[in-house]
Image (cartoon, coloured by chain):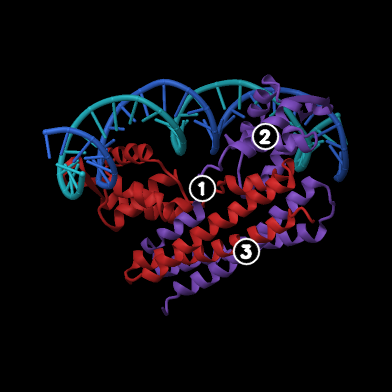
Chain colours: A purple, B red, C blue, D cyan
Amino acid sequence: MSLRHALLGMLAEAPHSGWDLTKRFERSLGNVWTASHSQIYTQLGKLEAEGLAEVVATFPRGRKDYRATEAGRAEVVRWLRETEPSGTQRNEAMLRVFLLWLLEPGEARAYLEREAATHAEQLAFYEDLAAAWQGDDPPQRAFRVALEAGLRIERAYVEWARWAAAQYDDAS
Amino acid sequence: MSLRHALLGMLAEAPHSGWDLTKRFERSLGNVWTASHSQIYTQLGKLEAEGLAEVVATFPRGRKDYRATEAGRAEVVRWLRETEPSGTQRNEAMLRVFLLWLLEPGEARAYLEREAATHAEQLAFYEDLAAAWQGDDPPQRAFRVALEAGLRIERAYVEWARWAAAQYDDAS
DNA sequence: TTATGACCTTTCAATAGCGACATGTATGCT
DNA sequence: AGCATACATGTCGCTATTGAAAGGTCATAA
């Protein structure tokens, strides 16, 4: 399971609460892997029970910060080294493109225009992030590398979606 | 559930057996949504029970070809029109990039070089498909539009992965 | 004739993931 | 004081997904 290792990786970087982690999934990370808070809290409990993570501080409102233990850190590293990325892909928006011929051309075009807008928005978000970005420790550099992928891929998406919308133009 | 509608969409295009559908998921479709044969056969059974798909022919070796019924076709269209794409994203290979700082720079670089190679291969596959492509009916055009997305995004991936590998160069 | 490999379907147990429900706390505004 | 909103965690039932096991057919070539 990847969620497990995603969490462990973040907890190896710095202490985080379930809330923090949920927010990180909603923002940047959500574009490569989604997870709901119910999944995250459940998993944190399991990681703690297995000795891979531990609570390092508690705060008002019941907030608990977790950190990866040595065993937890070792487990992510082992996972990175010894396992192949599973080929599981999930992108419902693109899946729909295969089925667009079932709609009227105008509807298909509208869908693609919405896609273009959505990706343009995402791109702008990444650009803001990149502009504001600083920090040069290893986790931040890894983030920067991932962000660059986001920038390039969103650009490709936006251009594609505009081109695709034109393909479904009534005139065509 | 998207799998359901993905299958229905393909069955609206032409009759397919579970085997065919599995192959289509392994090839082109797998890059936006993965599904194992066990899931596909189970789902075909359900679609048939609900009257959304029907067996239109049987062949040697137990092969059965399914086609979407009118109700099935209407259901995909309804889904396309009335529901928003779920935001679920899943891309384990990119998720790992966020965690690459946990490895030695050399290991990280090697990972990214493998990614570059994998995506270059995928790109070549799409290019071959595109070169061989012909047919101008609506489903084929939709496929062509999706393929164009694949081409553009894989190109972006390859270039990114090469750039990213250089970031983790020992010299850096 | 027999082995090999490609074709093809089915079932099942176990795990992962989703969405709704439940519960409560601190902050800031009116 | 009262209220809204953001913060914060946790549980539960249902559905989706995976991976493995099992069983069978046809074509081809050694």
For residue A37, say whether it is visible: no
Query: Disc 2 on helix, strand or loop?
Result: helix
- What residue do we see at 38% from left, 38% from top? B39
Q: What residue type is labelled 1?
A: Gln
Do labels 3 and 2 touch, CB within 8 Å?
no
Which residue corresponds to mark 2? A76
Query: Disc 3 on helix, strand or loop?
Result: helix
Judge if badges 1 and 3 mark residues of a common chain. no
Q: Residues within 10 Å of mark 1 (few under 14, many from 20)?
A: many
Q: Residues within 10 Å of mark 2 (few under 14, many from 20)?
A: many
Looking at the picture, how far across and down is residue B112, in whole percent?
Answer: 64, 52
Distance of label 3 from label 2 (alpha carbons): 27 Å
Distance of label 1 from label 3 (alpha carbons): 20 Å
Looking at the picture, how far across and down is residue B149, in whole percent?
Answer: 50, 64
Looking at the picture, how far across and down is residue A57, in whole percent?
Answer: 83, 26
Q: Which of marks 1 and 2 is in front?
A: 2
Q: Is B39 drawn above or below residue A41 in the view shown?
A: below
Specify the quadrant of the image occupied by residue B62. Answer: top left
Q: Which amino acid does label 3 sit on?
A: Glu
B32 left or right, relative to A144: left
Disc number for residue A89:
1
Q: Is A41 drawn above or below residue A30 in the view shown?
A: above
Do labels 1 and 3 touch, CB within 8 Å?
no
For residue A9, say whether it is visible: yes
